[in-house]
Image: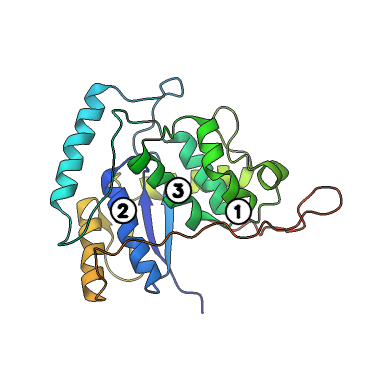
Amino acid sequence: MTRTPTILYVDFTCPWSYLAHRRLALLSADGMDVEVRAVEHEPKPSHLGLAGDDDFQCLREEVARVEQALLPGESLPMKLRGFVPSTRAAVWAYAESYGAGVADIAAPILFESYWRHGVDLGKPAVVRVLLAEAVMAGTSPSDPLRRWGYCVDVTGGPMTSLAWRLVRAWRHQWTELEKEVVPVLLPETGDIRYGVDAVDQLGQLLQERGIDPSAQPVWPHPGTRPPLDGHGRTQILHPLGAA
């Protein structure tokens, strides 16, 4: 029987999502079946790459609240660079990675790149570079993804119809919930948790399972790139699964 995974909706520039994802990674390493879905919490017009000073000040204040919610010994490494990028390109790229079977590699790359290294996730070319190796090691039947790692187009949009369907489905499912906040935790059993409550629930699960919150997550790395055929096309067919 297929188990229902614990689902977490995140935005890559949300500090609560960042903490929730790190806690979820520790639970995943302990055997919990998990799935991460990405949404743009507050979409920005495509011509606006970075948020203004007011948005960044709000982020700093939110980070201070997140740090107060850390468990004893727990850390949340970060180095803010003074800007809040649009996550449109990151969400599409993550969907392509999800469709290629490498979501568990892509999510920490995107989170850690922004929070620990100040990388601008709003730039499609940057996001391509970040995820190229992972995407090429995945199972997408799309040649641009498999051969060159193109996880988004030059505008930051999707490369495949599968990614387009995934993002549309994730956003529809998220907006149908009681609250349009991030993170949102849909546990295998129990009530849906929103925002801070979702993060607190993950912390409680760590304590119930006896997992040290000070432990650092071990992130997976891309494996060997699957072979291409004699014409340079992938030999792997990816099942078009639902979101």
- Residue in the image at 41% along x and 42% along y: 113
Q: Residues within 10 Å of mark 2 (few under 14, many from 20)?
A: many
Q: CA distance from mark 3 to mark 1?
A: 15 Å
Mark sitting on residue 109: 3
Residue 158, by quadrant, is: top right
Q: Amino acid at mark 2?
A: Val
Residue at the disc numbered 1: 100
Foreground tag (3 vs 1): 3
Asked if 208 appears above or below 157 in the picture, the reply is below
Instruction: Count every numbered label the image shows and give the total.
Output: 3
Q: Is residue 87 left or right of residue 23?
A: right
Whole-percent x and y of residue 130?
51, 41
Residue at the disc numbered 2: 184
Whole-percent x and y of residue 47?
45, 20
Q: Earlier in the sequence, mark 2 or mark 3?
A: 3
- Residue in the image at 17% along x and 56% along y: 70
- Residue in the image at 34% along x and 34% along y: 42
Q: Amino acid at mark 1?
A: Ala
Q: CA distance from mark 2 to mark 1?
A: 24 Å
Asked if 193 appears above or below 207 in the picture, the reply is above
In the image, 222 versus 166, the foreground residue is 222
Q: Earlier in the sequence, mark 3 or mark 1?
A: 1
Q: Amino acid at mark 3?
A: Ile
- Residue in the image at 13% along x and 50% along y: 68
Whole-percent x and y of residue 165?
56, 46
Q: Residues within 10 Å of mark 3 (few under 14, many from 20)?
A: some
Asked if 204 appears above or below 226 in the picture, the reply is below
Whole-percent x and y of residue 40?
39, 39
Question: Please, which residue is most extreme toward the right here?
Answer: 230
